[in-house]
Amino acid sequence: MSEFKSDFLHTLHERGFIHTTSDDAGLDELFRKETVTAYIGFDPTAPSLHAGGLIQIMMLHWLQATGHRPISLMGGGTGMVGDPSFKDEARQLMTPETIAANIASIKTVFSNYLRYGDGPTDGLMINNADWLLGINYLEFLRDVGRHFSVNRMLSFDSVKTRLDREQSLSFLEFNYMILQAYDFVELYKRTGCRLQMGGSDQWGNIINGIDLGHRMGTPQLYALTSPLLTTASGAKMGKSVNGAIWLNPDMLGSYDFWQYWRNTEDADVTRFLKLYTTLPMSEIERLSKLGGSEINEVKKILATEITAMLHGRAAAEQAAETARKTFEEGALAENLPSIEVPAPELESGLGLLTLVVRAGLAASNGEARRHVQGGAVRVNDEQINDERRVVGSGDVTGDGVVKLSLGKKKHILVRPV
């Protein structure tokens, strides 16, 4: 559908969020006539979501911003099983304690994007463990399981791919799509939720929920999926050469988060402005027309706007200023990421390769050695080509630190304590 009339779907379509819906016209009409409750599920597979999941959070943000009610569903129950969709092998099972700890950690991010409360458009945070953990197995098989066709479930791409490759799919994993479908029905009963959103890899699971609702007597339920994003060069969103781009501030600081977006490829800048910022479309259109060296200023705006939503405006502007001082003035910016090293250890001397690994600039001594051999490692802005170099107290600057750099954009301050 080229023209949506409801504010929410028009906004999502204009900004590039929509991959597929189950019924364009029907969903558009629903949003025009009532306040819609919609949800996205988040399985707690780690203590933090990463930037790849930010598109889902932004969809919930726009849902609320256009006058509707978002639900962020924590998968405390489904997380006990693990989503097998398009996975080559079964996920490692997590303990209930790990799942609970991950949920507690993940929750902290959402309040930066959503308003929670008791009002008609205030967000709800719900844990599907509230109903899944207490299920009576025989009753569930009789009341819910009978509505599922195994033949049809085997036809879904997420399952078919595993089977075609002759990769094992456990009965536990096979049940995941039934549990996710049941979540949709249960959320309708509890909150009147009519729409489930998610990535396009979740299409089959969401459609299962719609079909189950129909068989169990709910009103028409709907699906909306977003495209699975990669960068212009084909890299997965939320990953960098140095690891995942975590959303929790205690796992990745505002400066490194800002730098990730500052390093966006030219071809992705306009697309990311639409998806990950709340800048008006008119401003994005203006920025998209800038080229040449001006594209770097647009990237800084992109990085600052995305960082401001997650870390706050002050932290975003501080990150931008730290980058400016570091790259444009060549100054030692005190807000650069840092690690602490015991002063006696530095006085005795630390091998450069060991320090590069400890600073998180390489995963192993072998990788650190390759960086040194490639001329990418610098100590206090001096290129180091000797992998046997020892960093000691004599390298501590008048600012009381050693500046360790990898390439032009990755800097760590080593602080003796």
Image: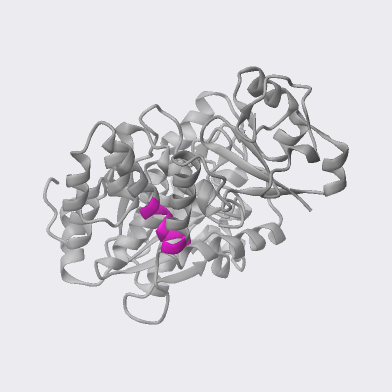
Count of labels in the image: 0
Left or right: 37 as drawn, with respect to 349: left
Q: Nearer the viewer, residue 160 or 385?
A: 385
Asked where in the image residue 352 lies, by quadrant, the reply is top right
Regarding residue 51, the answer to whether it shows in the image is no
| 329, above or below 249, in the image | above
Highlighted magenta segment, given as a residue range: 304-314
Residue 303: give x, y in percent of width and height.
39, 48
Residue 415: give x, y in percent of width and height.
72, 49
Left or right: 11 as drawn, with respect to 121: left
Q: Nearer the viewer, residue 410 or 149?
A: 410
Whether the magenta-drawn stretch holds residue 311 is answered as yes
Q: Residue furthest front?
A: 398
| 284, above or below 294, in the image | below
Whether the magenta-drawn stretch holds residue 25 is answered as no
Measuring 34% from the left and 72% from the top, which residue is drawn there?
A: 192
Residue 207: give x, y in percent of width and height.
36, 49
